[in-house]
Image: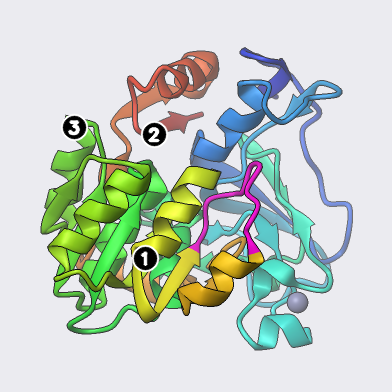
């Protein structure tokens, strides 16, 4: 089969790779219906995270189960399934408290930009839909694999509840879906921080009530203005830079919550600033698996349409153009069809 391989900065190739097969008795092999390029794929693509050797890419996936190992019980060939980028057994102590992305037996699922994928710990990792979905649901189901699950975790970790005032820092796919998540959880006011007209528009469609274009200290001042000088109850940080993290912490009201789901690059927190900020701080790699059953239900019943973040769809063989379009900010998120 042919799949995506990253060789170095801005060098993604679509080339021959070994077709995955069952290695452990708990594995499943799935035929990918759709995969995509993640904002976090751009860190190595841009050379900010070093690429030491040719690396297969992709960690968002959904598709049809082709084969399962001899110890797989719940997942069956023919089912349409979605899984997270971290495989999890869903039984260890970390999984049982809802932190499947810290599973004691976790493995990263990182070769999904391909027609066929091996998923470890299939019973714990994969969630099957009620039936094989119609084609128009596939983008929204694919979004659950990472970006929607991550946006939802941000809202959950920041204790967003009916009536909350929420600020979302970041207008990538995760930020936009954090807006959708906050809306779905009943937030009354949602302030989206975004400078890009097309992203502001989608944020508004997803439920943003206010848009702030300023960043850093100016952004903090604008958010304070909009919240009677108090700050937001919940701030969802979906970028991962020093500036976005500090904007998030300083935009939060005393006793409020900051959730951070942007992978940090060079973020350092000052202990004294943190001490006097008086905020709850919680984040990390989203335990997407915890939320998958609920999110599948919401998509299946037409309650949410997170697939709207895909504004470019390409055949998988044009994966390099998919990265380029996101790198150049011509696309919010690229969906790839094998
Ligand atoms: Zn576990």
Please state the quadrant of the image where ligand 1 appears.
Answer: bottom right
Q: Under tag 3, what secondary structure? A: helix
Picture layout, residue 164 above or below residue 20? below
Query: What kind of element bears circle 2?
Result: loop
Whether label 1 touches label 2, CB < 8 Å:
no
Q: Earlier in the sequence, mark 1 or mark 2?
A: 1
Residue nearest the observer in this picture, 192 or 199: 192
Residue 69 lies, in percent from the top left, at 80, 62
Q: CA distance from mark 3 to mark 2?
A: 12 Å
Magenta region, residue range: 260-270
Q: Find disc 2 in the rendering and name its residue.
A: 333
Residue picked out by circle 1: 235
Q: Is residue 209 magenta?
A: no
- Of 303 and 63, the residue lying toward us: 303
Query: Which numbered dot is residue 278?
Result: none
Real-space CA distance between mark 1 and mark 3, rounded to the nearest whole angstrom: 22 Å
Q: Nearer the viewer, mark 3 or mark 2?
A: 3
Q: Would residue 263 be counted in the magenta stretch?
A: yes
Relative to 131, residue 56 above or below: above
Task: Give residue 97's quadrant in the image.
Answer: bottom right
Can I make out residue 135 in this image?
A: no
- Would residue 37 appear left or right of 91 to someone viewing this image? left
- The colour scheme is rainbow
- Label 3, residues with CA under 10 Å away: few <14, some 14-19, many ≥20: few
Disc sitting over residue 198 in the figure: 3
Identify which residue is drawn at 47% across, 15% down.
324
């Amino acid at each position: 089969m042919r799949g995506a391989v990253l060789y170095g900065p801005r060098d993604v190739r679509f080339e021959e790779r070994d077709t995955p097969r069952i290695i452990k008795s708990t594995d499943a092999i799935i035929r990918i219906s759709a995969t995509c390029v993640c904002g976090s794929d751009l860190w190595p693509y841009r050379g900010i995270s070093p690429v030491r050797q040719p690396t297969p890419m992709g960690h968002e996936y959904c598709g049809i189960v082709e084969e399962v190992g001899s110890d797989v019980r719940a997942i069956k060939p023919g089912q349409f399934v979605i899984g997270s980028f971290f495989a999890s057994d869903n039984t260890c102590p970390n999984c049982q408290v809802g932190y499947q992305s810290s599973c004691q037996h976790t493995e990263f699922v990182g070769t999904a930009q391909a027609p066929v994928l091996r998923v470890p710990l299939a019973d714990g990792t994969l969630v099957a839909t009620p039936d094989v979905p119609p084609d128009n649901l596939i983008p929204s189901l694919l979004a659950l694999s990472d970006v929607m699950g991550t946006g939802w975790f941000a809202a959950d970790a920041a204790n967003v509840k009916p009536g909350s005032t929420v600020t979302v820092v970041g207008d990538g796919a995760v930020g936009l879906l954090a807006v959708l998540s906050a809306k779905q959880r009943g937030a009354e006011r949602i302030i989206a921080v975004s400078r890009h007209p097309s992203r502001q528009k989608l944020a508004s469609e997803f439920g943003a009530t206010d848009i702030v274009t300023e960043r850093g200290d100016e952004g903090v001042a604008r958010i304070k203005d909009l919240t009677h000088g108090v700050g937001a109850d919940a701030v969802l940080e979906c970028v991962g830079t020093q500036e976005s993290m500090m904007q998030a912490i300083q935009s939060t009201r005393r006793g409020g919550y900051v959730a951070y789901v942007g992978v940090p690059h060079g973020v350092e927190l000052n202990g004294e600033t943190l001490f006097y900020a008086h905020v709850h701080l919680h984040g990390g790699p989203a335990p997407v698996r915890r939320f998958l059953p609920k999110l599948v239900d919401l998509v299946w019943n037409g309650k949410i349409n997170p697939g709207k973040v895909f504004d470019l769809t390409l055949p998988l063989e044009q994966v390099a153009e998919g990265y380029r379009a996101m790198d150049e900010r011509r696309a919010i998120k690229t969906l790839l069809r094998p």
